[in-house]
Amino acid sequence: MRKFISQLFFLLITLISFPSQAQTEDLARRLFNVHETYREVSLTQRRFKQKDILPLISKRQGKPLYQIEQVGESFEGRAIQMIKVGTGKRKVLLWSQMHGDEPTATMATFDIFNFLEGKNDGFDSFRKDLLENTTLYFVPMLNPDGAERYQRRTMQGIDMNRDAAARQTPEAVILKGLVDKLKPDFGFNLHDQSPRYSAGRSPKVATISFLATSYDYELSINPVRERSMQLIVGMNKVLQKYIPGQVARYSDDHEPRGFGDNVQKWGTTLVLIESGGYVGDPEKQYIRQLNFMAILSALGKISDNSLTKENREEYYDIPENGRWVYDLVVRNATVKQSGKSFTADLGINRSEVNYANASKFFYYSKIEDFGDLHPQYGSQELDATGLTIEKGKVHPTTYKNVSEISKLNAKSLLREGYTYVRLAADSNTRALGLYFTTAPLHVLRAGQPVPTGTPGLGATATFILKKAGKVKYAVINGFVHDLDDFEAEKGQGIIE
């Protein structure tokens, strides 16, 4: 009887000490739903720069909740700041934008600050426990020089996530110094990844990917790395409610130059989070909301130590990132070459091209693969069975400028098979290089050669698809226009 009472007492203590999975999921659901209330409204698109977040940091100077410290300068002399919040014994270091073009978690960080300042919304107890049990150290933009140019690497041209050992960049020196000084129990290495990763061998884009980084080539698991796996298992469970089948993980291969691998080796439980793609969310505002929910949920598990209830083996149930998704796949198009016909698929990707100041971008699309693509998928797919692919024609009229072209009836031109229009030699666009137009047409500068032959591998993704001699679809710069359901305002044209 005494043994039974002892076991019952232990069970009751366990149930009181550790929230159930249902409680965890309820917290995550409420965090997800409240995000709009705390969303930082000044950050509405992902190509912001340090000047856009400095006022958000400055307005928190002097508030009792925060301690704000300049922890160093970038290569170009931009201040790198750290915001401390909380007084608990469990220390957590979170850094974002060590790659300048990976800003999703930076947006979520300022949403989290807004949330931590909230009250009387049903989360007061959660905030109190979080801030009493943890001390959070946020570095919202570790590579401001890269963010200025919306580029991955630092101003020196170095990938600082491969600079943990050599520390040739001042930004890497800063991060290593923080790890040495703070000796954080937990670290969050916050990134963005290509929107074309798939969650395993599937058509589903990997919206969020994780990695419990390996600290050696043997992929050993010590208590430090085990906690990484447990945290990821917990985050995956809540994310599956919102992006089912769209969570993936990176291969565990050890990277001796990587910060994630080394921070884990130095004794900090490290979770790497990568924000990928979600169809219809090019500015990653929904993914930002997922970051807000997942990071706060994970911090809650660190706060109450409930992460230890998660089964680390479930980490391996998360599918690995795959390379199985194109932006657009055209299936089963009939191709005519040298008097012969065959069917082929086209895999098309839309790459972002920065404007001069990197605040905005446009798309430049190419045919990345050609042939049998049945193992691959498209975020958008077009069934071209029974349709013949052809190069579009060049309209015989030469136009003075892009403004003239924007006034054309694009639908009529495309119906007649004209995908290309040409600018006059004195057009003021000659010095711009590759450029964008909202007209759903492919604009050729004077002297730019007309593409020849059937569109194929490596070509700009501009072509028409015909059925019985009639144009059914026009693909202009990788964007599909159904001529039976035409919307001119969706134009993503290109000027070459």
Image: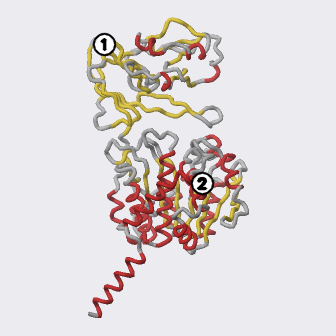
- Classify mark 2: helix, strand or loop: helix
Q: Is disc 1 placed on a helix, strand or loop?
A: loop
The residues bearing labels 1 and 2 have C-alpha atoms spaced at a distance of 59 Å
The residue to which callout 1 is attached is: 338
Mark 1 Cα shell of 10 Å, populated few (<14), some (14-19), many (≥20): few
**Looking at this view, is 207 or 229 the one in front?**
207
**Is residue 146 left or right of 420 when viewed as pictured?**
right
x and y percentages locating residue 68 in the rendered image: 69, 62
> Seen from this angle, which residue lies furthest top?
396
Render colour scheme: secondary structure
439 left or right of 346 in image: right
Q: Check disc 2 and give the amino acid type.
A: Phe
Using the image as rendered, state which of residue 74 and residue 351 is in the foreground. 351
Does the residue at mark 1 contact the one at mark 2 (Cβ under 8 Å)? no
CA neighbours of label 2 inside 10 A, class few (<14), some (14 to 19), many (20+) = many
Q: Position of residue 336 (x, y in %)?
A: 30, 15
Mark before the other along the chain sequence, 1 or 2: 2
Question: From the viewer's perspective, is 251 left or right of 164?
Answer: left
Q: Tell me the quarter of the image containing the C terminus.
A: top right
Q: Quadrant of the N terminus?
A: bottom left
Q: Is residue 346 above or below residue 156?
A: above
Q: Which mark is residue 110?
A: 2
312 relative to 387, above or below: below
x, y percentage for residue 462? Answer: 44, 21
Using the image, tell me which numbered label, if any, was put on residue 368.
Answer: none
The reply to whether residue 162 is in sight is no
Mark whose residue sits in front, 1 or 2:
2
Amino acid type of disc 1?
A: Ser
